[in-house]
Amino acid sequence: MYLKPGFEKYIPFVPQPIEGRTWPDNTITKAPIWCSVDLRDGNQALIDPMNLQEKLEYFHTLVDIGVKEIEIGFPSASETEYEICRELIDGGHIPDDVTIQVLVQAREHLIKKTFEAIKGAKHVIFHFYNSTSTLQRKVVFHTDVEGVKKIAVDAARLIYDLSQDAVKDGMDLRYEYSPESFMGTEMDYAVDICQAVVEAIHATPENKIILNLPTTVENCTPNQFADMLEYFIRKLPGRDSAIISLHPHNDRGTGVATTELGLLAGAERVEATLFGNGERTGNVDMVTLAMNMYTQGVDPHLDFSHINKVKDMYERCTKMKVGERQPYVGELVFTAFSGSHQDAINKGFEYTDKSGTGLWEVPYLPIDPTDLGREYEPVRINSQSGKGGAAFIMHHKFGYDMPKAMHADFGAIVQKESDRVGKELRAEQLFELFDREYLSAPKTYQLERHHFQEDARHGDASWVTFDGEVGYNGKNIAAHGEGTGPIDAFFNALQELPEGAIKGYQFVDYKEHAMASGSDTQAVCYIQLKDPQGRDVFGVGKSHNINRASLRAILNAINRSLLS
Ligand code: KIV
Ligand code: ZN
């Protein structure tokens, strides 16, 4: 027994029996109708609920993202909520293609107050609810099934009657009913009560009611929820007159899965919040749901291409923090600490660039970070990281595309430093290391001046003469050498120096590239030599002059080998 006993007091969920379930064979092929409940469910779960300015800013962000149905609050619940509703309407904040949704308990005076609050709005979803679960009936309301059904039906009739004037005045008014705690309600009873509401509110296939089936408190596995939903939908006589909506909370941490399986089981609409804010463990996260669809090639009809801006707004208005590992938006989700992950990601980027298919095929990155306005940042280099990560950063962040053979050389430097400081290294620290080791390394030998002469008389082949001065031991020493190209000529000149000759090095390889486009760009050269002890040594040189860049790289390699 590892856990203190206590689990015996919990009552296991009793699954809804269903025969021939079909939802497992379905896939999500289109976006649901999205409804944001940030300003209501999300707001009511904040330590400090949002003020008017914050709610307005949040509302406009939701509109910019493309949410067309927005639950703006509970206008009958408080003066503040009422005033916010009025400001949205009177202040002209609601675009014509956006419908506001208002929530109200199935109680007469609150319903009347809510009708006052929405006067003058163009498109409204009037959302009413009462709790229907066995547990709430037993411990909260002490009411039988008929009593609870009557609350819903009476409210539906009242709402229908009170709405007639508004509809005559041109309001586009739709109805939504939530059997709150649907997931804890007997399914046949949920069908019965919902059907009674469908009829009381005169819903038709042309004028559908939204039946919102909340997982008010998550209490079962997502597949069990999907079974319930398929059962409910099959049994509902007025199915054609209803839009089936989900409103999942996340108590078991499976809100996203519950929603996805719910969509497979026939739901058409989802109520969610940005980053999953909401009562207790939150509502289901709209961003994760939408981007999950996106990564399956399904257009979510929501725009999260500037996710950091959305996150900043969210954190400012709600005073909540988005977790570092939160899918798609968390600070650390586009980093890779593990060396093997970093290597595989680098290869994936190269493959994706070269494949020409336009398809995203990068291991460990299920989405292209740029689709969210973000970057892949293996900037988090720690002692677990491999050589590829550091090389990737130097390439993609600073433009130094080292040859493969050099990755291990720089990787070892990085690893040593990260062991020394005992924590991760940021990109800027990597650059400092690179600069210290290669670009600004101490110079035993230094190129003071040089001149090349090229003789190209022998057809394609050319013969190059180097003349110059190399600084060594505080003196400038004249150098002369010849070879098949500038590098060869310089290399030979170093071996022939009258003083301090550099002997025993072998040239292995070199690579060069421009740092940016344009004729004034700097060239970078990487040189690999074998030193007299047979060790591979690397050097880097940079200059506006391509020849000078390679000469500097040779000297850098030699100078480094003399120090080690
Ligand atoms: O979680 C819930 O059941 C609700 C209802 C009011 C829809 O928020
Ligand atoms: Zn809720």
Image (cartoon, helix red, strand yellow):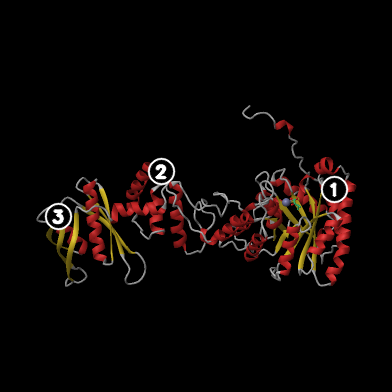
Looking at the rendering, which quadrant does residue 40 occupy? bottom right
Q: Residue 195 location in percent, x, y? A: 86, 55
Left or right, residue 555 beside residue 207: left
Residue to which mark 1 is pinned? 189
Q: Residues within 10 Å of mark 2 (few under 14, many from 20)?
A: many
Mark 1: which amino acid? Answer: Tyr
Alpha carbon separation for disc pair 1 and 2: 59 Å
Which image quarter is the N terminus in? Answer: top right
The residue that appears at 82% across and 42% down in the rendered structure is: 140
Is residue 406 visible in the rendered image? The answer is yes
Q: Secondary structure at mark 1?
A: helix
Is residue 268 visible in the rendered image? The answer is no
In the image, is residue 355 above or below residue 144? below
The residue that appears at 76% across and 52% down in the rendered structure is: 213
Q: Residue 316 location in percent, x, y? A: 59, 56
Mark 2: which amino acid? Answer: Ser
Looking at the rendering, which quadrant does residue 159 occupy? bottom right
Residue to which mark 3 is pinned? 474
Alpha carbon separation for disc pair 3 and 1: 95 Å
Viewer-proximal residue, 504 or 109? 109
Q: Residues within 10 Å of mark 1 (few under 14, many from 20)?
A: some
- Going from N to C along the chain, the mark reached first, 3 or 1, is 1
The residue that appears at 81% across and 58% down in the rendered structure is: 239
Which image quarter is the C terminus in? Answer: top left
Mark 3: which amino acid? Answer: Gly
Viewer-proximal residue, 111 or 359? 111
